[in-house]
Amino acid sequence: MINFLKQIFTWWHKQTVGTFFYTLLTGKLAGIDSFGNKYYYNLKGKRWVIYKNIVESSKIPAEWHSWIHFIKLNKPSQHIEKFSWQK
């Protein structure tokens, strides 16, 4: 019950009710990153993210950051090969 009230009245606990209904009605799931964030898009070209826990924009990996800001048109693949020096 408390999580439901947090979702209604605050935006920093995942998503608001408006975003929930917008995602439910128009959103298409693009993918999920390593942190558990879910990325959506709609047919009009809008892209957005639903964070797993607290809303923190630094929790978006670089490959998803470039997709959500329209730097890359194609969404990142699930199996991203990293070099040994990358975290």
Image: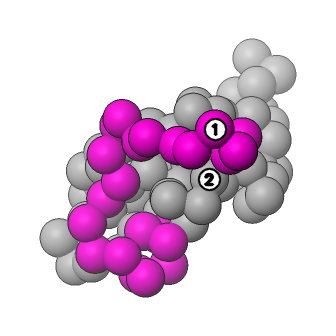
The span from disc 2 to disc 1 (Cα, nearest Å) is: 17 Å
Indicate the position of residue 40 as horizontal and vertical percent values.
37, 54
Residue at the far top in the pictured view:
1
Indicate the position of residue 21 as horizontal and vertical percent values.
41, 50
Residue 58's place in the image compared with 53, above or below, is below
Residue 30 appears in the picture as rendered: yes
Q: Label 2 belongs to which residue?
A: 61
Dot 1 falls on a residue whose secondary structure is loop
Magenta segment: 66-87
Q: Residue at x 43, y 41 (%)?
A: 81
Q: Nearer the viewer, residue 68 or 61?
A: 61
Residue at the far front in the pictured view:
84
Within 10 Å of disc 1 (Cα), the crowding (few <14, some 14-19, many 20+) is few
Residue 21 appears in the picture as rendered: no
Quarter of the image where one finds residue 35: top right
Dot 2 falls on a residue whose secondary structure is loop
Q: Residue at x 70, y 28 (%)?
A: 4
Q: Residue at x 78, y 58 (%)?
A: 58
Q: Nearer the viewer, residue 76 or 70?
A: 76
Q: Label 1 belongs to which residue?
A: 84
Whether residue 42 sits left or right of residue 57 in the image: it is: left
Label placed on residue 11: none
